[in-house]
Amino acid sequence: MAEPEHGRWKPKSNPWAIAASVALAAFMEVLDTSIANVALPHIAGSLGASTNQGTWVLTSYLVSNAVVLPIGAWASSVIGRRNFFQLCIVIFTVASFLCGIAPSLEALLIFRVLQGVGGGGLQPMAQAIMADSFDEKRRGLAFALYGLVAVLAPSIGPTLGGWITDSYSWRWIFYINLPVGVLALVLVQRLVQDPPWIKADPKSARRLDYVGLGLLTIAMAGLQIALDKGEENDWFASTFIRVFAAMFVAGITGLIVWELKHKNPIINLRLFKYRNFAICCFLMMLVGGVLNAATVLQPQFLQSLLGYNATNAGEALTMGGLALVVVMPAAGVATGRFSARILAALGFAFFAGAFYYSSTHVNLGMSFGFASWLRVLQVLPIPFAFIAITNAAYIGLPREASNQVAGLINFARNIGGSIFIAVTGALVTNRSMFHQARLQEYMNYANPQFVEYTRGLSRALGGGPEGTYAAQAAIYQDLLRQAGMQGYQDVYRLLAWMACGMVPLAFLLKKKRPGEAPAGDIAIH
């Protein structure tokens, strides 16, 4: 197909119809990564498994998903991008049905691996299709829609999952993917087409980088299992965790060495030679980390310390999702008018302010309304950083690299999310124990205030030895909650300082605004 004037190919269908179609499929996949979290106890109980065994439902999906994420460019070169995208929708939808009817935990884990394989291609290919369907100046608006998918879905997933599980059955969190998958498949078939520079070559399947794929699988399995099971197994005190951590180090080291030397690598690491793209991947890893950590920390705080159930804790995130619907389009417009470095730095600065405010205001008496307000503050900066970095990743790279760019930038975001969720969870536990030890120093009968408070509470609880024991137990429970609150405050403060450090990193990006220079000015070998 010949390209039109100005050398710019345009799809036959309306770009916004295309964007909505691929976003629908991506939304289904992103939602599925969080919707199952709150249903794990129900899944484990109904299948006769322990809660710890049930967590493999998440881990198995994340491992296979992480392996497929960066290899979409190769798969697209074999069968075409649209065909690969449709294949991923079919695999994900069929696997969702199989998960819903799974008779045992073992069967469910196998089907979740299959579902992860299908889901791994949906996010990056949706982003790549959007990138090629819009010109550089309007790409930011398209990525605003993609940002809603990537950010909004994890926010509503726990609430929706909790409601479905409580009202119906955990199996319906998988069945709801069926009509969405069918609709997405029909829309993609009718609207999406491959640009002329993406040509399917079935012969390239014979040149599959089997060694690279194997090393990638080893690395991602080691990383995800070590992160997901680390706190449960006391991290590096466990031989189990040390083995999988060593798998990751060996796998990723071997992968980097092999891919840089291989003629047809499954992941084109040579893209990282270009400063803007390398910086964008690093920043997106941090954005994904901060986003996912914030999404997990607040519901945990509300459930563990304020007594919320899973559904109510998820509902406290809803206002943040509504705020994103308003702010995302505005951020998309701003991306076409201001340089990415300015918008990203602004977003990180807002991140720092929001998390510092959270560190000083989360408390054991805060209301549902205030918790919702904190969530709004935490998500408002996301669109500016997310869209700006996503858009900047394509600047200066040839259009033929869009599949690789999308795969790697999403890979970085997901890996950052996994790392931050694990690390912040461990830090909350560690800092809570630190504050618990400090507070316990004041719980002794050499402290007059402690003695007086215990006596007063004991009298209020009936007096006598039983009243004293009840008073001591109540005081200790208050101490644990206070220590836990201070642990969360410390982690929020750490995220604030980390966001401050990201501000100067944003200024390492190129000064060019999207649209000032056409893609394709750099060749990749």
Image (tube, rainbow, N blue to C red):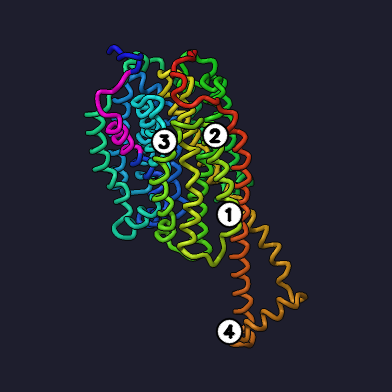
Residue 33: x and y, percent?
40, 44
- Mark 3 crowdedness (10 Å alpha carbons): few <14, some 14-19, many ≥20: some
Amino acid bearing label 2:
Ile
Asked if the magenta segment contains residue 293, the reply would be no
Kindly report the distance in space between the C-alpha atoms of the residues bearing marks 3 and 4: 61 Å
Nearer to us of marks 1 and 4 is 1
Residue ranking furthest to the front: 337
Kindly report the distance in space between the C-alpha atoms of the residues bearing marks 1 and 4: 37 Å
Residue 117: x and y, percent?
38, 34
Q: Earlier in the sequence, mark 2 or mark 4?
A: 2
- Mark 2 crowdedness (10 Å alpha carbons): few <14, some 14-19, many ≥20: some
Region rendered in magenta:
9-26
Amino acid bearing label 4:
Leu
Q: Secondary structure at mark 1?
A: helix
Mark seen at residue 257: none
Q: Secondary structure at mark 3?
A: helix
Asked if the magenta segment contains residue 11, the reply would be yes
Residue that carries the numbered disc 4 in the rendered image:
461
Mark seen at residue 357: 1
Q: Secondary structure at mark 4?
A: loop
Residue that carries the numbered disc 2 in the rendered image:
342
In the image, 357 versus 125, the foreground residue is 357
Q: Secondary structure at mark 2?
A: helix
| Residue at image point 55% right, 45% down | 350
Kindly report the distance in space between the C-alpha atoms of the residues bearing marks 1 and 2: 23 Å
| Residue at image point 40% right, 27% down | 137
| Residue at image point 25% right, 27% down | 13
Residue that carries the numbered disc 3 in the rendered image:
333
